[in-house]
Image (tube, grey):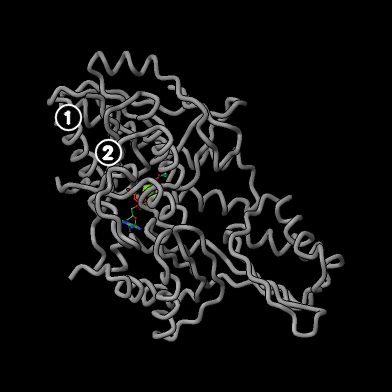
Amino acid sequence: MLIVQKYGGTSVADAERIQAVAQRVKREVDAGHQVAVVVSAMAGVTNQLVEHARSISRLHDAREYDVIVASGEQVSAGLLAMALQALGVSARSWQGWQIPILTDDAHAKARIEKIEVDTLKERLAGGEVAVVTGFQGIGPDHRITTLGRGGSDTSAVALAAALEADRCDIYTDVDGIYTSDPRIVTKARKLERITYEEMLEMASLGAKVLQTRSVELAMNWGVRLQVRSSYNDEQGTLVVGEEEIVEKEIVSGIAYSRDEAKVTLNRVMDKPGVAANIFGPLADANINVDMIVQNISADGKATDLTFTVPKDDLDRTVEVLEGERKNLEFAELIADRNVVKVSVVGVGMRSHAGVAQKMFQALAEKGINILVISTSEIKVSVLIDEEYTELALRSLHHAYGLDDD
Ligand code: ADP
Ligand code: ASP
Ligand code: MG
């Protein structure tokens, strides 16, 4: 079998952890498998590198940002290759550009376009373990790119697809995918299986256990994806097609995201074309607007408009809107970073009514005010004050009968 394994930051946090990973890899090699390992930077390193970049300049050249933040993975790949060699396992490290992992030119959030795997395949067939840097690739201009935070998951799935691997195992610091973040909801239950579609929704709504793009790739390429712990040998969670799930839950999980900020424009003119005038310039500035709510005006003249944008884009959003103030004629702009988006996810919602109502009821009982609501076929999201994150997650988890007692 050909296996791709991916180890996240905590799994390669220090020499001891790296040696434990090497042992795990050796086990698969000894069992006669070909193994490609994708590694993240050691825990905390990428955050530190991002801080270094920000301390020099807030509005920096994204190409240089990538040069800086991609360096963490180079270190952990080298260390793991060394640790494997020390165990007598033939191994070498590969950086994104050496393979190469070819991406587009969207620095800091690049997408993998192609991985040339011929050489890698030969080496693997020859019994050498490939230790590949996650998170990074090389752009059309031959400069280093990175795939967005959490991008090593995507490197692993893309590599598994390109190598036509039999399995892609994502090793992390929890032993699977849970009904909610187990670090906040202590009664969260581990799922044996989850559909690609539900995991995609959970990831895009903030569940950081897998990067959204990695789930998308796994779904499109039929990669057999498993999330499991690098600390024990417990069965993890399989991400599978809907046909492989026997019992479908109405609600499979509850996710949250602290990555959005709320913007309110008070007393905007209530006339045709206003929304286009507001969101047009934001789209031009490449700012993704997520949730939107507009009130009906009492006097037929002016109304309030509230929406969310990524927190990282809040400063730019304010700048763009203030720049358009003459056209937009709003009375006041209020920006709020202290919000969280909480979402209930489940494919069963398609055929069951009352899911949203249960959410509103549960939050009302705890006195939690809902600021914005948005829905899709398989999820309901609400924006609330950040201070209620834990309370909201635990109450909803209980209300939908997900608690593990
Ligand atoms: P790694 O460094 O291994 O990539 P991450 O921190 O990116 O690890 O992802 C694992 C974390 O995801 C867990 O520690 C957990 O707090 C968080 N998480 C959020 N939602 C979930 C969920 N539904 N199931 C499991 N883990 C979750
Ligand atoms: N090291 C990168 C990050 O912290 C990539 C990853 O861990 O997946 O975002
Ligand atoms: Mg991660």
| Quadrant containing ligand 2 | top left
Between 308 and 109, the one nearer to me in the picture: 308
Q: Is residue 95 above or below residue 208?
A: above
* Residue 39 occupies quadrant: top left
Name the mark on residue 298: none
Q: Amino acid at mark 2?
A: Asp
**x and y percent of residue 259 in the render?**
51, 61
Q: Is residue 41 above or below residue 395?
A: above
* Residue 23 occupies quadrant: top left
Q: Quadrant of the C terminus?
A: bottom left
Q: Residues within 10 Å of mark 1 (few under 14, many from 20)?
A: some
* Residue 145 occupies quadrant: top right
Query: Is 24 left or right of 61, judged from the image as shown?
Result: left
For label 2, the SS is strand
Q: Amino acid at mark 1?
A: Glu
Q: Quadrant of the N terminus?
A: top left
Residue at image point 60% right, 26% down: 140
**x and y percent of residue 63 in the render?**
60, 38
- Indicate if the residue with disc 2 has its beta carbon within 8 Å of ligand 1: no
Between 19 and 256, the one nearer to me in the picture: 256
Residue under pointer 2: 169
- Indicate if the residue with disc 1 has its beta carbon within 8 Å of ligand 1: no
Q: CA distance from mark 1 to mark 2?
A: 12 Å
Residue at image point 31% right, 43% down: 243
Name the mark on residue 28: 1
